C-alpha cells in the first residue's frame, strides 16, 4: 500500500480477509453462499480498505497465502464511479495493483473472465437493450459479440467457483426491496436467477458488499439465504482519525429580503481566505498545497441572465480569478457553456477533484453519485427550500479532509466546510440539520450561525501557555504490523527532517548486520535446515492386499524442485518482516552466494524463527535513535513532533501521551435547534475564547447547556469565584481537547471532561480545576471517573481540584477525585446506586 492505513482500516482489512477465507472454505466444502459486508461512514476510506483487501488476496500477507488466480468483478451503478474507483485503487496501491490488472467488462469478449484480473462493470451497461448482450432480449443476435456479459459471468461462476469474487460497491443503493431493472441487475449478478434477457444466472459464490448504510444490503442478503459476515467501522474512529473535517458551518440569513448575491459574495470571500490559509499552511509545514474549491448549486431552471449575474458577482469579488478557474458540471450541455460574452468550460463531476485549476464549479444536481472532492470547502446553494435532503447529501460529500488528516496548528478554518444557504430561512435550516444528523454516514459537528471566537485579551496570556502544555493523550495515528515497518517509517522521517542523513540505508544495514551476526552464531543449525530444505526424504511403505500388515521398504532422497524452492522463498519473504528477507538475500548474493543458495538460506532462517530477532533489533535501533534525538525533536514545530514521536513509541498502550493544542480561534454555535425552531444559546463571561468586538454578545462565549441543566449550574457556581481568572469549555474530540484514556470492557477509549477553570491562588501562580458534571447511570461512568482521578493524581503539579458532579434528588453533589484511593473505590462502583453511595459518604454539596 502507498498509504499507511489507520488502525481501524487495518482492523477492517484483517477482518474482511478472514471472512473471505471462511467464505471460500464454506463454498468449497458444502456450497455455502456468503455475503461479506464492509460498512463504514462517509470519509472512512472504503476504497482504500478494499484496495488493501485486494492486495492481501492477490499478494498474500504474512499469515495468508496469496491467490494470484483470483478473478474479481467490481459492480457499481455508475460509469463515473467506476472511473473514479479505478483511479483511487491504482493510486492507493502504489503499483502493487496497477492498471494492467484492471479491465472493463465491456471491452472483454471471452468465454470466461480471466484469472488474476479485476473487471469493472456498471449496471446500466447490463440493461435489457445493452450492446454487451450476445443475444438480445428479443432473441436477435449481436454480430459484434461472441459471448454476452451474462454468459461470461455465468461461465466464470461455473468454472472458477470459489476463485471468483463479486464486489458490490455502494451496495445500499441497489439492495432495496423495490423492484427496478437496475436493482434487479445487481441482485441477479449477486444472487442469480432469471436475467433481463431471459437466461438463468447462477449465484455468485462469494460477495463483498461495500456500503455506508448496511441495513438494506444485510436484509437483502439474508432474504437471499446468504451467510452474513460483517466488518463494521465505528463512526467515532473515523472522526478521531482526522479523515473527516471537524465541523460543518451553516450560514443563512434571517431577513425576509432576498440576498442571494450578497451571500455568494461572502462565499467567494470565504474561498479566497481559505486559499490564502492553505498557502500559508503549505509554506509553514511543507504539506501538499491544497487548492480549495467553491461549488455553486444554481437554481433548477437557471436562466442565462441569472448565470451572467452569478459570474459577475464571482468576478467582482475575486477579480484575479481567470476564466479557466470557473467551470460548470451541468448534465446538459456536456461542453463549453456560452453565457453572454463569456465561455465557461465543462468539467465532468469525476474530474473535479483532480483539476486544481478549477476554483469555482457551477452545477445543478446534487453530484452525490460518482463524485468525491475533499478540496471542496465552500458550498452555496440556490436550490429551493424543498431540496433540503439533496443539500444534506451534498454537504455529506464535502466532509473529507483534503490531506487525509486533521490540520493541527494554524487556521481552524482548514478543518471546516462552510455551506451558505440563501433563501433557507429558519425552518429550512432545521430540515437540513435534521437530514444531516439523521444520515448515519455523516458524523461531523454541525454549527448553526457560528461565531469564530478569538483569544480573549482580558484573561491572563499565561493561561494559553498552560493550556498548550497541558498533558493529554491521543490515539496513535498509525499502527505498524511489525517493528521493522515502524523502523523504516521512522528512518524516512528522521532523514526528511535532517536528523539522520541516509537513515533508510542505515536502518537496512543495521538489520542486515544483526542477521549476519545471528547467522554466524547459529551457522550449524541453519546449515542443517538448508540441507533439509534442499533434499526431500521419500519413504516407501508396502501393504499386502487384504492383510493388516505393513512393511517399510525404505527411504530415499530426492532433490527439491526449483519451483518448490521459489515458493519456499516467497513464503519466507512474507514471514521475515518488511523487506528484511530481501535485504539479507541481496547481502548474501553480494558475498558471492549463488542465488538459489542465498534464497534457501533465507528460507531456513525464516523457518527457524529469525523474525523475532529482526524485530528485537529493529526495536533496539528505534530506541537508540529516540534517545539520541528526543531533545532535538522536542524543540521542533508541533507538526514535526507529531509526525516523529509516534514512530519511536514502543509501548503497548493504545494511547500515546501528547499535549493539548491551544487553538487560535474557537468556532462556536450561537443558535440551536429546539423542535422546529432556532433559539439563541446562552453566553458566559471570562472564557479563554470570546465572540469578537462589534458582534452581538462580544466578549462572551456561547455554551449550550440545554442538554444538561447540571452544566448550567456548574458554570454559574464556578463563575462566582473571586479567584477565577479564566475557563475553557473542553471540546469533545480533537487536539484542542484534554483527553484522558480509560479502559471499558475490551476497548480503550478517550474521555473529555467538560470544564477547565483556572484560579489565582494568591502567590502569582495559576492553578487548574477540572469539573465534570456527568450522568452516573451510564455503564462506563465509573471507568471514566477512575481514569480522571488517576490523571489528576499523576499531574498534581497541574491540577488543584478534580470534581465529578452528579445530581442526587434535587441536590448537586461533588466528589473530589484527587483524594487518596478514590480511583480504586470509584472503579468498582459499577451502577448508579453504588456511585451515589460513594458521593453520599465522601462527597460534598456543590453550590
Image: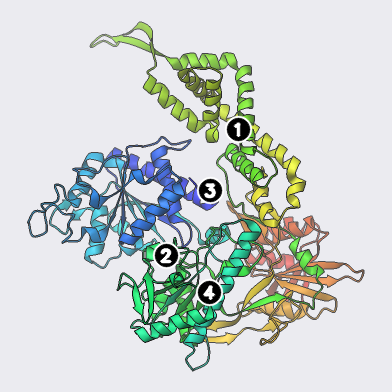
Mark 2 secondary-structure assignment: loop
Q: Is residue 446 visible?
A: no
Q: Earlier in the sequence, mark 3 or mark 2?
A: 3
Q: Which label sits on residue 839?
A: none
Q: What residue sits 62% from the left and 68% below the top?
A: 412
Specify few, some or many for label 4: CA neighbours under 10 Å numbering under 14, 14-19, or 20 or more. Answer: few
- The alpha-carbon separation of the residues under discs 1 and 2 comes to 41 Å
Q: Which label sits on residue 352?
A: 2
What percent of the width, then of the height, locates residue 665? 67, 72
Mark 4 secondary-structure assignment: loop
Q: Are marks 3 and 4 in contact (CB under 8 Å)?
A: no
Specify few, some or many for label 1: CA neighbours under 10 Å numbering under 14, 14-19, or 20 or more. Answer: some
**Which residue has dot 1 on it?**
508
Q: Earlier in the sequence, mark 3 or mark 4?
A: 3
**Which residue has dot 4 on it?**
320
- The alpha-carbon separation of the residues under discs 3 and 1 comes to 20 Å
Front: mark 3 or 4: 4
Residue 104 left/right relative to 663: left
Q: Earlier in the sequence, mark 3 or mark 1?
A: 3
- The alpha-carbon separation of the residues under discs 2 and 4 comes to 21 Å
What percent of the width, then of the height, locates residue 599? 48, 22
Residue at the right extreme of this rendering: 763
**Which residue has dot 3 on it?**
4
106 or 621: nearer the eye? Answer: 106
Mark 3 secondary-structure assignment: loop
| Rendered image quadrant of residue 342 | bottom left
Amino acid at each position: 500500500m502507498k498509504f499507511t492505513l489507520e488502525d481501524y482500516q487495518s482492523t477492517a482489512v484483517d477482518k474482511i480477509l478472514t471472512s473471505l477465507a471462511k467464505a471460500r472454505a464454506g463454498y468449497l466444502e458444502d456450497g455455502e453462499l456468503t455475503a461479506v459486508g464492509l460498512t463504514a461512514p462517509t470519509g472512512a476510506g472504503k476504497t482504500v480498505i478494499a484496495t488493501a483487501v485486494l492486495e492481501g488476496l492477490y499478494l498474500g500477507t504474512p499469515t495468508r497465502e496469496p491467490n494470484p488466480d483470483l478473478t474479481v468483478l467490481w459492480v457499481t451503478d455508475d460509469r463515473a464511479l467506476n472511473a473514479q474507483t479505478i483511479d483511487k485503487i491504482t493510486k492507493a496501491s502504489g503499483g502493487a495493483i496497477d492498471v494492467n490488472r484492471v479491465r472493463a467488462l465491456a471491452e472483454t469478449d471471452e468465454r470466461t473472465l480471466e484469472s488474476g484480473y479485476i473487471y469493472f462493470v456498471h449496471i446500466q451497461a447490463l440493461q435489457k437493450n445493452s450492446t454487451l448482450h450476445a443475444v438480445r432480449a428479443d432473441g436477435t443476435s449481436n454480430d459484434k459479440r461472441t459471448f454476452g456479459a451474462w454468459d461470461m459471468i455465468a461461465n466464470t461462476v461455473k468454472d472458477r467457483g470459489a476463485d471468483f469474487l463479486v464486489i458490490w460497491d455502494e451496495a445500499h443503493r441497489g439492495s432495496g426491496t423495490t423492484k427496478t431493472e437496475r436493482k434487479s441487475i445487481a441482485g441477479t449478478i449477486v444472487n442469480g436467477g432469471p436475467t433481463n434477457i431471459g437466461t438463468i444466472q447462477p449465484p455468485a459464490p462469494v460477495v463483498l458488499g461495500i456500503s455506508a448504510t448496511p441495513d438494506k444490503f444485510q436484509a437483502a442478503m439474508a432474504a437471499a439465504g446468504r451467510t452474513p459476515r460483517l466488518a463494521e467501522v465505528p463512526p467515532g474512529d473515523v472522526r478521531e482519525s482526522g479523515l473527516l473535517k471537524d465541523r460543518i458551518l451553516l450560514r443563512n440569513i434571517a431577513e425576509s429580503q432576498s440576498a442571494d448575491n450578497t451571500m455568494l459574495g461572502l462565499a467567494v470571500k470565504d474561498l479566497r481566505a481559505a486559499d490564502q490559509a492553505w498557502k500559508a499552511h503549505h509554506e509553514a509545514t511543507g504539506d501538499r498545497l491544497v487548492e480549495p474549491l467553491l461549488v455553486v448549486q444554481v437554481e433548477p431552471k437557471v436562466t442565462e441572465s441569472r448565470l451572467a449575474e452569478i459570474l459577475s458577482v464571482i468576478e467582482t469579488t475575486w477579480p484575479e480569478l481567470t476564466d479557466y478557474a470557473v467551470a460548470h458540471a451541468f448534465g446538459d450541455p456536456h461542453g463549453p457553456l456560452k453565457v453572454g460574452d463569456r465561455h465557461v468550460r465543462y468539467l465532468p463531476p469525476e474530474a473535479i477533484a483532480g483539476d486544481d485549476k478549477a476554483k469555482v464549479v457551477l452545477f445543478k444536481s446534487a453530484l452525490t453519485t460518482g463524485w468525491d472532492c475533499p478540496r471542496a470547502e465552500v458550498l452555496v446553494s440556490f436550490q429551493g427550500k424543498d431540496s433540503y435532503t439533496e443539500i444534506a447529501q451534498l454537504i455529506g460529500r464535502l466532509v473529507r479532509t483534503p490531506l487525509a488528516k486533521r490540520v493541527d496548528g494554524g487556521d481552524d478554518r482548514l478543518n471546516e466546510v462552510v455551506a451558505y444557504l440563501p433563501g433557507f430561512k429558519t425552518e429550512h435550516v432545521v430540515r437540513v440539520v435534521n437530514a444531516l444528523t439523521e444520515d448515519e454516514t455523516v458524523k461531523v459537528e454541525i454549527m448553526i450561525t457560528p461565531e469564530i471566537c478569538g483569544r480573549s485579551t482580558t484573561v491572563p496570556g499565561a493561561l494559553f501557555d498552560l493550556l498548550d502544555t497541558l498533558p493529554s493523550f491521543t490515539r496513535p495515528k498509525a499502527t505498524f504490523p511489525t517493528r521493522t515497518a515502524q523502523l523504516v517509517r521512522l528512518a524516512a522521517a528522521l532523514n526528511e527532517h535532517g536528523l539522520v542523513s541516509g537513515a533508510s540505508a542505515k536502518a537496512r544495514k543495521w538489520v542486515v548486520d544483526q542477521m549476519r551476526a545471528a547467522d554466524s552464531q547459529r551457522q550449524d543449525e541453519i546449515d542443517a535446515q538448508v540441507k533439509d530444505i534442499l533434499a526431500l526424504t521419500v519413504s516407501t511403505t508396502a501393504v499386502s492386499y487384504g492383510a493388516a500388515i505393513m512393511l517399510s521398504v525404505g527411504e530415499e532422497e530426492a532433490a527439491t524442485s526449483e519451483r518448490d524452492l521459489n515458493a519456499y522463498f516467497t513464503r519466507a519473504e512474507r514471514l521475515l518482516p518488511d523487506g528484511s528477507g530481501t535485504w539479507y538475500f541481496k547481502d548474501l548474493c553480494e558475498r558471492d552466494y549463488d542465488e538459489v543458495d542465498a534464497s534457501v538460506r533465507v528460507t531456513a532462517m525464516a523457518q527457524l524463527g529469525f523474525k523475532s530477532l529482526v524485530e528485537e533489533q529493529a526495536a533496539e535501533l528505534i530506541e537508540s535513535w529516540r534517545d539520541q534525538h528526543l531533545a532535538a525533536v522536542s524543540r521542533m514545530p508541533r507538526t514535526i513532533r507529531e509526525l516523529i514521536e509516534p514512530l519511536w513509541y514502543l509501548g503497548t498502550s493504545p494511547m500515546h501521551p501528547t499535549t493539548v493544542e491551544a487553538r487560535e480561534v474557537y468556532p462556536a454555535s450561537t443558535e440551536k435547534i429546539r423542535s422546529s425552531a432556532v433559539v439563541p444559546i446562552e453566553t458566559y463571561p471570562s472564557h479563554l475564547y470570546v465572540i469578537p468586538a462589534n458582534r452581538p454578545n462580544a466578549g462572551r462565549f456561547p455554551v449550550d447547556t440545554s442538554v444538561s441543566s447540571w452544566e448550567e449550574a456548574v458554570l454559574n457556581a464556578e463563575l462566582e469565584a473571586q479567584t477565577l481568572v479564566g475557563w475553557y469549555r473542553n471540546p469533545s474530540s480533537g487536539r484542542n481537547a484534554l483527553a484522558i484514556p480509560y479502559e471499558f470492557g475490551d476497548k480503550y477509549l478517550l474521555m473529555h471532561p467538560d470544564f477547565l477553570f483556572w484560579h489565582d491562588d494568591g502567590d502569582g501562580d495559576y492553578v487548574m480545576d477540572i469539573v465534570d458534571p456527568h450522568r452516573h447511570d451510564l455503564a462506563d461512568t465509573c471507568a471514566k471517573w477512575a481514569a480522571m482521578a488517576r490523571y489528576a493524581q499523576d499531574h498534581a503539579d497541574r491540577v488543584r481540584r478534580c470534581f465529578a458532579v452528579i445530581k442526587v434528588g434535587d441536590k448537586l453533589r461533588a466528589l473530589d477525585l484527587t483524594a487518596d484511593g478514590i480511583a480504586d473505590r470509584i472503579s468498582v462502583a459499577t451502577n448508579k446506586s453504588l456511585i451515589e453511595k460513594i458521593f453520599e459518604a465522601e462527597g460534598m454539596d456543590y453550590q
